[in-house]
Amino acid sequence: NAGVMQNPRHLVRRRGQEARLRCSPMKGHSHVYWYRQLPEEGLKFMVYLQKENIIDESGMPKERFSAEFPKEGPSILRIQQVVRGDSAAYFCASSPMAGDYEQYFGPGTRLTVT
Amino acid sequence: GQQVMQIPQYQHVQEGEDFTTYCNSSTTLSNIQWYKQRPGGHPVFLIQLVKSGEVKKQKRLTFQFGEAKKNSSLHITATQTTDVGTYFCAGGKNSGGSNYKLTFGKGTLLTVNP
């Protein structure tokens, strides 16, 4: 029973390049959340998606960041024209339903912008 | 916006000593969840509290939710080296009928000296 999968685990990008982070939720989960974690910080909510729908993107920067969760395939967090400040760990979590349910986290993608 | 404060930021104990971390929200919460993150790892769900004044135990771990549903604590009795990690609280607030949005505290990093 595979858990939440994220790839790549580590990603190095130069300033100005694009970063694509992928997340496959647990089997049977249709709710996906993306968080960003800076060193010695908590997790910051970015976006919440259901299949083909963005439900809440209030935590996501208005520019350069976008997310999708297509009908088929993984959820993707895309960061265009990366800057050094985008360096962080990006975690994806999934849950079977929204509301008072635990969220299952993936192993994260560590993004380094050089 | 909603803020969740967590103290202390760091705690170093001798193996066998007790440990407590505290979590305070600026607003009333619908639920509070606790997660543990090992160094280099991802957050792992520990427990969820929903009711005012609720107390739950998991072996050596005791979780409490305040009467006003604005604060919570995690207490570990007789720490072991396997307890090392960062403990995060995450508050859920009813937002438009859905409690999915978690606001994480910055976490308490626990280190244990054997």
Image: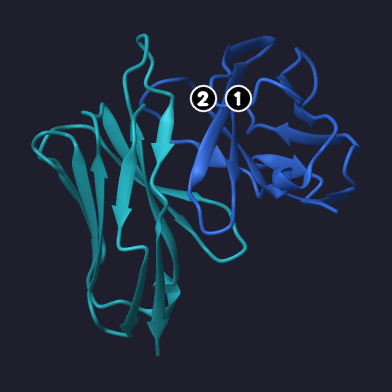
Chain colours: A blue, B cyan
Name the spot of residue B32 as percent of width and height, x first. 30, 38
Q: Is residue B57 visible?
A: no
Q: Return the residue nearer the eye: A43 or B80.
A: A43
- Crowd band around label 1 with a 10 angstrom C-alpha radius: few (<14), some (14–19), many (20+): few
Looking at the rendered structure, whether the residues under marks 1 and 2 are on a common chain is answered as yes
The residue drawn where x is 16% and y is 32% is B51
Residue A99 in the figure: left or right of residue B59: right
Tag shown at residue A28: 1
Residue A80 in the figure: left or right of residue B44: right
Q: Secondary structure at mark 2?
A: loop
Q: Is residue A26 above or below residue A113?
A: above
* Residue furthest bottom in the image: B114
Which amino acid is tagged 1? Gly
Q: Return the residue nearer the eye: A27 or B84.
A: B84
Name the spot of residue A97 as percent of width and height, x first. 48, 20
Name the spot of residue A85 as percent of width and height, x first. 70, 45
**Residue hosting label 2:** A96
Question: Dots 1 and 2: beta carbons under 8 Å?
Answer: yes
Q: Secondary structure at mark 1?
A: loop
Q: Is residue B73 visible?
A: yes
Name the spot of residue B37 as percent of width and height, x first. 50, 58
Q: Return the residue nearer the eye: B31 or A72.
A: B31
The residue drawn where x is 75% and y is 12% is A71
The residue drawn where x is 59% and y is 51% is A38
